[in-house]
Amino acid sequence: MTDTSFSFDFDDSPRPAFETLSDPSGVLVYDSIQNVRFELYTETDVTLDLVDVDEVPFPVSAATTFSATTITIPKLLSVYARNCDFELIFSWSDNVGRQLSADNVPYLQLEHGAINLYLGVNGPVAVSSDGPNTVIELESETTVTLGARSVHKRPAGTITVPDDIDATMRAVSLLGSALKTTSPERSFPTLRGHPPIIERGDAFSVTGGISSPNMGVKLVLPPSREYVYPATSLAYYLGADVVSGTSPRLVTDGIEHPLDEPADYETTVGKVLQHVFFLDCLTRTEGLYDTKLHERQQVERSLDIDFAGLYDTPLAERLREYLTYPFETLQPHIPEWPLTTDVIPTPENVEFLPFVADDLSLVRCPESPRKRPPQSSPAVIGNFCRSSATEPNGAVEKQRIVEPKPVETIDHAWVGDGYPLGSNKVTIGSRRRHIDRTTPENSEIQVRVVCNDEKMAAEGTVKELYGFRKLVEYDVDIKYDRTTDELRDLIASPIDFLHYIGHVDHDGIQCTDGILDTRTIEDVGVRTFLLNACRSYKQGAELIEKGSRVGVVTLSDVSNPAATKVGRTLTRLLNVGYPFRSALAIARKRTLSGYQYITIGDGGTELCQSISGMCSYGTVTRSTTGSYLFEFRSYSTRYCPPGTLGSIHLDAADCKYLTPGVFDTFELTADELDRFFELESMPVEYDGDLYWSDDISARDLD
């Protein structure tokens, strides 16, 4: 039988806080680590009484009580009514198009990717929608228990490894110890803990009570980093023991599945990960989440799969059964995989493996990355650029710009020397800063825009693009003509985002009284940044090395019009919750020189949460009948990693979807499209141009 028990440890978890609201009355749930705010409105003012989480029957790290008759949530989300055994009574979303109710509901689970929320109600409940709001009605005034759990994950311990490959294989075998269940529900991100940290040292050791998960699965691999590193995510997800052998293969329950046929090894390993993970997502619909899933409906048209039987099958036997279904039949229905990471197979890069596994990233080990000098874009001709001096002779040859091979995933990351063209260069320090985050002193998102050239003042209007979001508090300020001391002090301050507009050359960042070289800065407090200037990658790399988490920089000259377009597009995408890496991937397509921009540091970082928890992107075309064909795509975030359930609030969408990737294409009338645009600000592509849903209507697309 499938083990559906879950293991949670909240001793070291960040604890969300609760505050009362007025005008309107209600409760604010705030996760300061993740910069997540969630509001529930009540008919009258409430009084909060904190309660011991040990007395709460659901897995939370903070809880409070208040009295209410009606609870209104200012967004549309799914609500699961559950009994005391966690069995589903009903599930509601606005797609059902009606009210759902039950007489005896112990508690409700609210589906919001950015934070885990539960309501203890113990009585009759009715759930419905009112425009863009979710409404929960109780029979009479009730003492409601509100529980919250942060989605922020911290590793349970540390594995120290010497540089020999056997130690690395032992370490990778322990990554699966972070899984909270062996059931198909492990495909839910909240049931996949962060793998233990790996550090290099003189001898192998383990702290934090980490032990082998003993799943009955082995990955037999040749003892070399070129084989072990690409198998990291698969080993983590399967809880597999990684052992030495002559030919790569997966061994479980009496079968051996080759990992180098019919495609190359790295491709095959990636396909097996997607294969098993996808079928877990489909099989789990037979368990605690009885969900009408779009992808399951599509697969069942091609394959006769007994999902109920699979759900009740032990892990090793279930894995064996999964692998009997052809990947080629499943592949058209598997959501787009979010990330491929190129990892240069060196001993020092072993420390990245826990983060690669946490991302469930596909992994490649480039043998010799292609190098190319940075090139100015064609748009530079006839336009002034954002550099104030010419690079010294020979500088281009010394700059190591690498050109990664194309990937089939949404995003790409690079681990190793060099600066990857059109990609994300990741550093170990930036990834560790994410898990080491502490509660900030200020709950507002602090944004500082610095414009040090009056000719670029047009981009300074980005100040207006921050802070228009509900449920997100911004502190935005713009400064012109900063001196070196003023910019140094700003970089040292604990602000969330620095948007620099001006000139950068080989000596540093241009200020009114000279050049500020970030190599001379000792204290870096700014969390994220955009250095929107020519050849800013060296200066940005110093900021990442000294404390920043992520930044956007350029590899070559960029023209001012192109830089302005990238800067404004990036700003709006960050403001609606896009991760830096994905935001830049979209923004760079808006101009010919966009490929010169790269993300450096932890590209999965978000400036704030999106309203729905996932990031959305729409593409509109006109049908021959005059209606609108609307393709809806979701992007992965830290709140909505692979395995998250997503929904789209359209009458034509009567099921859930797996994120990320394209959900479907819907045929809509003008009124239906306009109503959808009113729900949330999102980028919308039409006829090759990018618009924003809150700036346009269907009439504008005629």
Image (cartoon, grey):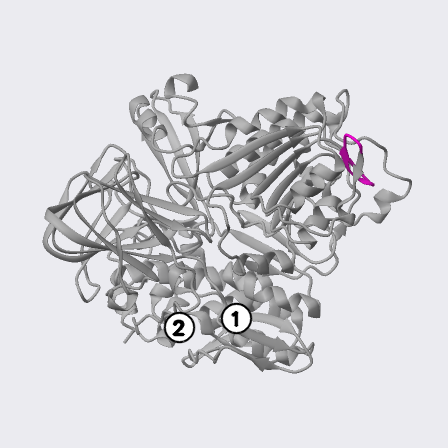
The amino acid sitting under disc 2 is Arg
Quadrant of the drawing holding the C terminus: top left
| Residue 226: percent from left, percent from top | 66, 68
Residue interval drawn in magenta: 504-513
Vertical side of 266 occupied by 211: above or below? below
- The residue wearing badge 1 is 196
Residue at mark 1 to residue at mark 2: CA–CA distance: 27 Å
Mark 2 — residue? 320
Between disc 1 and disc 2, the foreground one is 1
Residue 505, magenta (yes or no): yes
Where is 314 relative to 525, above or below? below
Tell me whether circle 1 and circle 2 mark residues in contact (CB < 8 Å). no
The dominant secondary structure in magenta is strand
**What is the crowding at mark 1: few (fewer than 14 residues within 10 Å), some, or many (at least 20)?**
many
Q: Could you say where residue 124 lies in the image, as x and y percent from the top left?
A: 10, 52
Question: Which of the pair 336/602 is nearer the observer?
Answer: 602
Return the disc, 1 or 2, that comes first in the chain's sequence: 1
The amino acid beneath tag 1 is Pro
Q: Secondary structure at mark 1?
A: loop
Residue at left 48%, top 37%? 474
Percent position (x, y) of residue 270? 53, 61
Q: Residue at x 44, y 67 (%)?
A: 12
Left or right of 388, for residue 459: left
